[in-house]
Amino acid sequence: MDSSKMTTTTTQPSSLVDTTGDGNTAMVVPGSPQENGQQFEQDAPHKPPLNLLDLPVDILRLIVKEITHTNDLTALALTNSALHNLAIPQIYSRFDIVWPDGTITATESKSVDALTYGLSTLTLGSAFAQATSRTHRSSIRPLRKFAGNEYAKYTKKFSLGNGPKDWVDEYMITKESGKMLGTLVAIAVAKMVNLEAFVWDMPTGVLSDIFMALGSLGEANEDGCKLNRVWVRWHDNTEHLMGPSPGLNPAAIGAPAVVPPGSHVTPVGIMLPSDARHPAPRPPVSYSAHHCEYPTFSVLPPLKSLTVLDIDELSYLDEMAVLIGRSKDSLRELRVGIAAKASNKDFVQPWDGPGLRQVDHRARWPGESIIGERRLGGVLGVLVGKIYDIRKVGSSKPREKINVETSAGLGSASSPVVSTLPGTPIEGDGLTQTDSIPATKEMNIDLGQAAAELEAVPNAAGKAKASVKTEKPARQRNPGRKRLEGKLKLETLELERVPLSMQVCRSAFDWSTLNSLTIIDCAQHDTLWKILRKSFQPTPLGAGNNPSTRTSTPVALEYQLSLKHIHTDSTTPSLIAFIKETLAPNTLEVLFLQDRKRGSSPPAVQLDAIFKGALKRHRASLQKLLIDSSAKPLPHPTPTGESNNNRWKNWVLNTEVLMYITSGRMPNLKELAVSLDYRDWHTFLQRLPNIPHLHSINIPNIVDYVHPNFDPRELANQMTDIITLRPEIRLCYIGIGAKCFEILESRDKGSRKNGDSSSDILDEAAASAEASDTSIDGAIDGIAQADDAVEGESSEEEEEDDGDDSDDENTPTSATDPDDSQTEDDEDGSEQEGEEEDSDEDDDDFVEPNKGGVKLRLREILFYDDKVAIFKARHGKL
């Protein structure tokens, strides 16, 4: 209140009072409501400031939600009951089991691991506490031990990660401990009414009890089932086939696919010659004789994300087909991986021919299926069997006669050849087998013919003559079931060791909605890029698909695909042409190119083609880039990451490409994984300030290093020196060779002794942060000291650098004021500053860091595959 403008008097009936506090006066009459209100405010007692617990519960809940460290949440829960009730839902919202390093021996860990402790907490207490409370007198408070808990209802994510093989093998479902683990998990999951994500990445097997518990979550929740993401990595099911099982032939189940000579590949799959027959399907088996867990995926509710890896049984695919059919409208992410040992089995290969079907629609469970292991369209044909029919619907002869008639063809194929598909992975060497049968023109899909068949004929195999007696004429087909013509509107599709059926890829997926595509070790991948390139050519804006409206003059183009993420382990010219011609410029954000399926021959794609066809076209949008031509890593790599072959040298960045990447023309690049030449190493260091937004880098190999074996830590220290001089660089994780380092900050407390103790504290804090689920952006923000203004200036410089590369080599560093590195007062409180400025000791003080300054140091860590995409992608697997 402005007292100079306020006037009060007792002799006048009214007065001018500054009632608004902004200097303006108003007339206040004695006895009016305005005067009474002012008197009430003066008489009201003074309220103390609000404490934390005085805030509304909704505000407190939002505050607690921002706490990510488990140790901090635990300390908060121990403060008082109010904060305990707010922290408990956050503590138990995630149940993540992360295995320790394999170098730790069993004697160094506790006698009971965290997995058992955690499941014990989630499964026990509730029912027992209710029964115990009835036996005690109501006037006596029961012990905390008998209070019970409902922690499981807060769990939204349940995750069991993979760990060292010796430790994980103890929990195989074929062992007693594995059965006990599965039972405990099933009991715990049944109580997680708010569960949203279930992840089982341990290759130990998953009991059917767990799937039934997941399927029952909707019954216990009034809002329905909230489960939308399931991730399962299956185990090696070979041990189940050791014992005798009626109706099963273990030798036949484990045998690779046998294709007779004369077979050719159609857009659907492998078409046998007219004089060959497919093996007879097995008869139905009983549940006791079935060697796979049932039920599994068929009892789950509709999902948004489904990931199933290391599949080695056809039963799992049949179960997944039921779930995919149920999730047709909601499924957005699909990841499918075939086990390496099963990559050559019959059910994996795509087949074509009369009498073959995708799934058995009459079978109530996989054991009742009598259509055999050779399926129409292979793995993809089975997965979409409940939503898309490859061929027109028509019933075969009665089911009871199928086995008799098809058994006549058993063994009729002469001179069987193993893995005759060109491009089919051969187990053991990871290369491509092309010499199994003569390399005729029939074994390669003709692109023009395949595209014509895909567009004109829904049944790509309709031209084949019926060579099996079980196929009825078209006029005798039963039109009882309508033809399925659905499509999966996926946003993410990742396939590993899945031979591709072009008919399924073209017609069963809506490619216009796909954002991320990963193709790893998949046969016929090159044909897929050709089909997509021809089918989704850009058209002139507003012209539609009419070729007659296209003109030779440059016009705006309309692109039909919106792919932003591509990862493949086999880079071909067709892929580069697809990226260059089919995707809109500056739309691709993630590009991981590997070349692992090639033999000793030169690469099909040179680095210059990748640079011109992909990097320059999408330079403004690329955020994560990996270029690696090395072979699969050795089982026991050397400490520096060197391998016995030199294939990785084919895609070593030359000086031109390196200068382009580090010129600032790629402003969104955050992760980079490439191999370098040592002659360009210092050029890379000098130009590192041009890419301050880079926060993760991996350099697996360096060619022509001065010593036979380079020291990764020494090279990482050189990069840290550059970051010290240019603190706007946000680099956080450095991978060099087989070593990975994290850049951490430590603050000097004014003396070496205090500085060392501070480093120890930071070590403990960093270890705690590593165990928690903190985002990588938070870690980077802790390292970066540049503000938004500096970043803005940096981006402007990058745009100017677009015009000329020669100016980039002499990028000036920011000026540093010498006074900024000194302290104004001596720590001992000395007043003789003038004399010390002229002394020799002043020079020593100049080079020492300032009191409380920031120092950077390296800490060797494991590769953060779960946080850094380039670290995970370097393995070349899902």
Image (tube, rainbow, N blue to C red):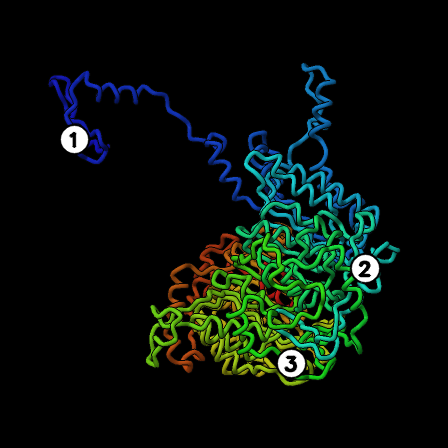
**Residue under label 2:** 238
**Residue under label 1:** 25
In this view, the residue farthest toward the front is: 475
Q: Amino acid at mark 3?
A: Glu
Is any atom of residue 162 visible in this view? no
Instruction: Indicate the position of residue 303 as horizontal and vertical percent values.
Output: 58, 49
Report, in whole angstroms, how far the alpha carbon at label 3 lies from the one at label 2: 35 Å
| Position above or below: 664 against 234 | below
Q: Amino acid at mark 2?
A: Thr
Q: Mark 3 touching mark 2, by CB under 8 A? A: no
Is any atom of residue 416 visible in this view? yes
Q: Amino acid at mark 1?
A: Thr
**Mark 3 residue crowding within 10 angstroms, few (<14) / some (14–19) / many (20+):** few
Counting labels gives 3
In this view, the residue farthest toward the right is: 244
Q: Residue at position x 62%, y 50% from top?
A: 323
Q: Quadrant of the N terminus?
A: top left
Instruction: Indicate the position of residue 341 as horizontal and vertical percent values.
Output: 76, 65
| Position above or below: 336 against 142 | below
**Residue under label 3:** 442
Q: Nearer the viewer, residue 574 or 681?
A: 574
Q: Residue at position x 35%, y 81% from top?
A: 552
**Mark 1 residue crowding within 10 angstroms, few (<14) / some (14–19) / many (20+):** some
Q: Residue at position x 52%, y 54% from top?
A: 778
Q: Quadrant of residue 264?
A: bottom right
Instruction: Indicate the position of residue 239 as horizontal and vertical percent values.
Output: 83, 57
- Tell whether 511 sits left or right of 366: left
